[in-house]
Amino acid sequence: MSIKVKLALGAAVLALGAWFYATPYLTVRGMQQALDARDAAKLSGYVDYPALRNSLKEAVAPKSVLELNQSKDKNPLAAMGAAIADAVIAPVVDAMVTPESLALMMRGIKPKPGLPQGGADEPATGGASEDRRAGVDTAMGYEDIDRFVVTVKQKEKPEQSLGLIFKRDGWFGWKLSAVRLPE
């Protein structure tokens, strides 16, 4: 094999490795562009909604069920409350996990369930995307080869960070599949 072929092969392997490493960053960038364009359909292409809903149900349900189980001795109806907690939580999570509420979470805004389409108390025609991101700190990085986390927190509430967890979808694709809620 000639030196030119070896160099070309080495360059190709290096480029493939760089692309493999950069794909989650490109996915986050694509999601941000979809947010800026207010393109819910494009944003939905980056999200595994069933996995995201299950993640939120698991994150929310244990806290409420644990509270009910701790009060069983004091309140006999707590056992029944623990049994129906899942029936109450599931529809709320399903209603909250929408492209619109996801867009708010990525900007560090907590969605409010009472507002249309999971909205928050902000006008639909907000300022420029840079203005919306001014009060938000974002950090991102790999947790392992198949898990990438974007941590979003508002500058005035840094203790309430939200983790957006992406999982690999094929060799080069990534989908938002879980959320790590503030404690």
Image (spheres, helix red, strand yellow):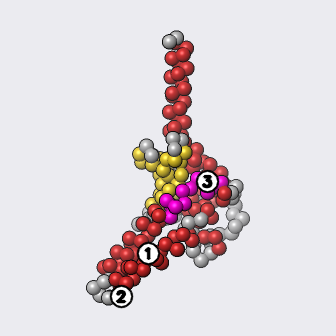
User: At 54% across and 41% down in the image, what residue appears?
Assistant: 172
User: At 51% across and 41% down in the image, what residue appears?
Assistant: 171
At which x and y percent is residue 103?
60, 61
Q: Nearer the viewer, residue 151 or 144?
A: 144
What residue span does the magenta drawing correspond to? Answer: 42-53
Instruction: Find out whether residue 46 is within the magenta segment.
Output: yes
Tell me the quadrant of the picture where the C terminus can be found: bottom left
Dot 3 amino acid type: Gly
Mark with earlier residue (2, 1): 2
Q: Which residue is mark 1?
A: 86
At which x and y percent is residue 110?
55, 68
Q: Secondary structure at mark 1?
A: helix
Main secondary-structure element of the magenta-colored stretch: helix
Q: Is residue 72 left or right of residue 17?
A: left
Dot 1 amino acid type: Asp
State if disc 1 and disc 2 touch (CB < 8 Å).
no
Which of the 4 image quadrants contains residue 61?
bottom left
Image disc number at residue 77: 2
* 164 lies above or below 115: above
At which x and y percent is residue 47?
56, 56
Please rate how many residues cluster around mark 2, counting C-alpha atoms within 10 Å: few if below 14, some from 14 to 19, many from 20: few
Residue 168 seen: yes
